[in-house]
Amino acid sequence: MQCSGCSGIQKVTDTITNPTAREIYKREFRDNEQVYNNWQAAYQTALTDSTTVSLPYVEKGKFSTDINEVYTYDITLEEGEVLIAEVIKDSSTQRVFIEVLGSDTTKPEKAEINRTQIKYIPDATGTYKVIIQPEIAADTPFTISIYKRPQYSFPVAGKGNADVGSFWGMERDGGKRRHEGIDIFAKKGTPVVAATDGFITYTGERGLGGKQVWLRDGMFGKSLYYAHLDSIAVQGSATVKTGDTLGFVGNTGNARFTPPHLHFGIYTGRGAVNPLPFVFKTNKPEASGFTFNYTALQLKTKATANLRQGPSTSFNTIGQLTANDTIQLLGQHHDWLHIITRNGKKAFLHKSLAREIK
C-alpha cells in the first residue's frame, strides 16, 4: 500500500538533502537494487577510462539493452570556452545522464538527466571528462555531439578569427614584456562592439593604449579592455548589451606607427588572461555527415589490431588485439569504431580491422 503523504515528505526531505540525479533514479529500483547496482558499477568503472577526443566530435551508434554502456571522453578546455555535449535519440522517452567532471571525479561539476544538452563553462584551462550513460535497458539509435563555443562574441564588427594578427604572449619591446591580449586588424573606423552584456567602467585616453574603453562583465566579473581606438562611442558608467558599439578601430597610443587594429584584453582578479578562447569563433559539427554502418553490435577482429586512445593514428596505442577477438561496439566516428574489449577496456579501432558477427 502506497503512503499518500510520502510524496510530499520526500519532496521536503530532498529540499534538505539535495540528492543527486543518480540517487533519485535509484529509487525506481527499490524492488531490484542489484539491477541499479550493476548500472552504477559500470559508471564507477568508467571513471578510470582514458579515451580522448579532439573537438568538435560526433559519434553515432545504438544504445543496447544487452550491456550497461557508459561513454567517456577526456577533452581539453581552455578558460573562456563553453563546452556543449549533446545527445539526440530516436526515442524521446528514454533518459540519458550527461555529466562533466574535473580533476575531482567523486563529484560532477555539472550534471543533467533527461536533457538533450549540457553546457559547461570551465573555471580554468585543463582536462575534463564528459560522461554519457543511458538509463537501464535503453534501446535507441543516438548521435553524440561534443563541441565548444566562445564565452563572448567577437569584439570587432564583421571580423573573425582570420583577422587576429598578434597573439597572447608575443614579445614586446625587445622581450622586455609580453603581449597581454590579441590584436584584431581592421580598417580605421570599423565599429568595436561589446563582446558581452555589462557596464562601462572607464573611457578616455591614457598610456600605451591611447583611446580606450573598459567593460565590466557583471559586478564581480571580468574586465574587457579595448585599446588604440580612433574614437569612443560610449560614456563611462553606461550599461551596454552584446553588440552595442563602444568605439571605432584606430591606432592611437603606442600603435600610431602600426596599421589600425583593436588591442583586446581580458583581466581577472588573477591578472591578464588569454582572450582568444573567449572570442574564437567555432561551428557546431554537422551530424548529417556521419554514419553508423552496423546492424550487429558484436564484432570480431580480422587480424592483429592496435587499440587507440582516440579516433586517429595520432593518438597513443593503448593495447592490441589478435585475430578473431570479440569486441562490443559502442559507436562510430567516421572510420573509427568506439569499442569495449572482453576485459572491459574502452578504446578506438579502425573499422577496416573488424567485421560483424552475423
Image (cartoon, rainbow, N blue to C red):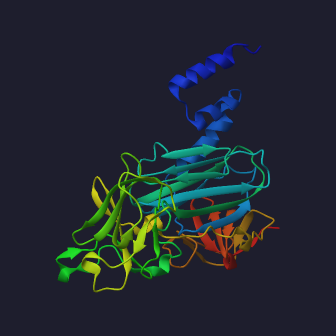
Measured as percent of width and height from the top left, residue 69 is found at 66, 52
- x 60%, y 57%: residue: 85
Number of numbered markers: 0
**The N terminus appears in which quarter of the rendering?**
top right
Residue 51 shows in the view: no
Vertical side of 103 occupied by 248: above or below: below
Horizontal side of residue 5 vs 159, given as left or right: right
- x 49%, y 76%: residue: 161
Horizontal side of residue 60 vs 198, given as left or right: right
Residue 64 shows in the view: yes
**The C terminus appears in which quarter of the rendering?**
bottom right
Vertical side of 112 occupied by 304: above or below: below
- x 35%, y 76%: residue: 167
- x 58%, y 43%: residue: 41
Front position in the image: 264 or 67: 264
Front position in the image: 218 or 205: 205
Q: Quadrant of residue 177?
A: bottom left
Front position in the image: 318 or 24: 24
Vertical side of 298 occupied by 179: above or below: below
Q: Quadrant of residue 264?
A: bottom left
Measured as percent of width and height from the top left, residue 335 is found at 67, 76
Measured as percent of width and height from the top left, residue 233 is found at 42, 64
Front position in the image: 61 or 145: 145
Measured as percent of width and height from the top left, residue 209 is found at 27, 71
